[in-house]
Structures are given as structure tokens and as C-alpha cells.
Amino acid sequence: MTTARLGGRQPPSRITGWRPVQQARPRAQRSAQEPEQPGASRPGPQAQESQGRQPGRPVQAPQPVESQVRQPGGQPAEPQTAPPVRLARAPQGRPVLTGPAGSGKSTTLAAILRYVQACFPGKSIVTLEDPVERQIDGVTQVQISPHGQMTFPVALRSLLRQDPQVLMIGEIRDAQTAAIAAEAALTGHLLASTMHSGSPGGALLRLLEMGIEPYQVTSSVIGVLNQRLVRRLCRHCGSAQGGRARAGGCEHCFGSGYSGRALVAELVELDGELRKALLAKADLEELESILQRRGHMHLRADARRLVSQGLTTEEEASTACGGID
């Protein structure tokens, strides 16, 4: 090929400064083979950790699932008995997380998925979220467009054809999604989801109100975790006066008296009596009566535990749980 046929341009091999692109090497291999430039500073741990983050997306350190829920005595729950862990270790079924907006449901779901990854490596895990709040390595996360074509029902039907082992739906919002989720949980999948409800019994009744058959609810739902978040007392300025925890205010907590948050939760696992009541379409009052007879620890009882340990105040617990008397 001549230069004239290229329109006066030189062949690529003769272009000044041209060189083949080298294959990228792992960072650890490059640092081991290439000498460090004189005067160049090596990035610190915080700078190294921040590399690869997406702009505008907060990154939070993962926490063990078992550290988020404690036993009634106040001691950390054993890995096999913590409520989220018992739901995560189920081979199939439908754990449901309830609570108002901002109660930490997405954080608990992410912790459950990380626990499944750690205990059952190799499991196929897929999530449907709107939006994707945090990225989890090794998990396929799908962004849902509720006002477009990629809706929860469409994405869920497509995923079930690929036979994933663990599914997570960010929120059950309509009857169609609830029906497909019930069918998926009955066909051997572990499907975790969230709902907006004030109590475990209310979440179960809401599924019935969405048109899900009672037998589908009793056969698919393995447990309902209802949770709230309360603010922790600042360890620098918090005090106890007259046996009651008091919030102060200092530079460490920006004058609020609180620093960090703690989880308040209650878990309802379906047993024979609850299933019979749901099949009979019992109301909320009857479901609460059944839970009381079997010694269920209510959300307010867990909040009272935190107050007795001096981790939060009665006012904060009452605000989150509606009174702890």
C-alpha cells in the first residue's frame, strides 16, 4: 500500500509516536515491578479505599448481621439465633421486613445478603431495587424503572426463568408483584422483600388485602421482621440522672446529645396457630392476641431494653416505637 492511496497519510506503523497498547496489569503487580518515582507520595489507607467509588454514592462499612440484633438479656445474639440470621439461613421461603421509611430495612437486607455470601459461597443472588442504594460485590443488582418498561413484575418474571437461588425485592408495592413473589417463594427460592407496615401482623394482613390467597401467605412467608432505629446517646456527654439516661450536648455530637443509631426489632415466625388464624382470615386484634399468648417480645419491649442499658433515652424510644410504658 502506497502513501498516495492513503491520501498522503503514512501507514499506521510509520506514524510518529505510535506504539501498541500494553495490556493493563493488576495494581499489586505494577507496584511490585515498577520503581516508585522520586518524591512521589504513596496514597494513604483512606485514599486507597476511596479509589473506585462512584461520585455522589456514600460508602458504608459492612457490619455483621448478628451485631445488629441482640437478645432480650442485652447480650449479642449468637450467629445462629439472631433474627436476621435465622431468616437468612432458610433454604427457601419469603422473609418480609417491615417498618416506616428510614427504619434501616435496606441496611438489614444488605447485611442478610452479605451473610448468605459468606456462609453459602457460590449461591446466585439477584436484587431488584428502585433505586440501587448500595453496591454489594458478587451480587447482581438490577435498577428498576417503575414508570418505564423495566418494572418489578416484568423484571421478576424474567429473573425466575434464569433460576436464581436468592432474590431480593426492594419493596412490594402492588398486588401483581406480591403475587409473583409468593409464587417464587413457593418454587424453591429464598426471596427477601420489604413492606411499609407498622407491625408484623399488619404486614401479613396487607398481603391478604392485596389479593394473595391465604394458603400462599402461610406457605411462603417464613417470618416478618419489624424494625425501627433509635438514636444512641453520645458517649462523651450522655449521663444518667435519677436512674434515667439524659442527653447532653457537646462538640462530638454537634450539640444534639446523640451519636449513631441502634436497632430495635421484633421477629414473628409463622407457626401452626398463626397459620390457622391466617387461613381463617383473622383480624389484626386476633393476631396480636395470639402473639401475646405465646410470649412474643414486642417492639416496645426491645426499646425498653435499650433504655435500661443506658444506650438511649425514654423520649427517643417513645418517639420511635410509640411509647414504652
Image (tube, rainbow, N blue to C red):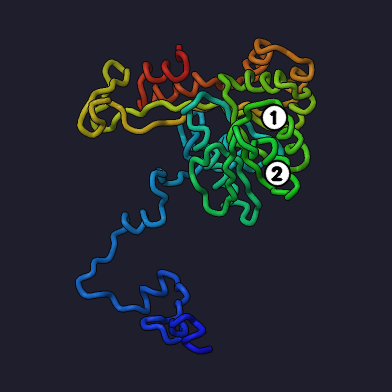
Vertical order, 298 against 133 (above or below): above
Amino acid at circle 2: Pro
Q: Quick one: label 1 or label 2, which is nearer the N terminus? A: 2
Q: Is residue 169 left or right of residue 92?
A: left
Examine the image and state in which quarter residue 172 appears. Answer: top right
Q: Nearer the viewer, residue 2 or 253?
A: 2
Q: Which residue is mark 1?
A: 178
Which corner quadrant holds the C terminus? top left
Q: Residue at x 64, y 43 (%)?
A: 89
Vertical order, 45 against 191 (above or below): below
Give the crowd class for mark 2: few <14, some 14-19, many >=20 residues within 10 Å: few
Is disc 2 placed on a helix, strand or loop? loop
Q: Residue at x 29, y 62 (%)?
A: 43
Residue 314 seen in the current view: yes
Q: Give the distance between the C-alpha atoms of the residues marked 1 and 2, in whole angstroms.
A: 20 Å
- Looking at the picture, how far across and down is residue 36, in whole percent? 28, 75
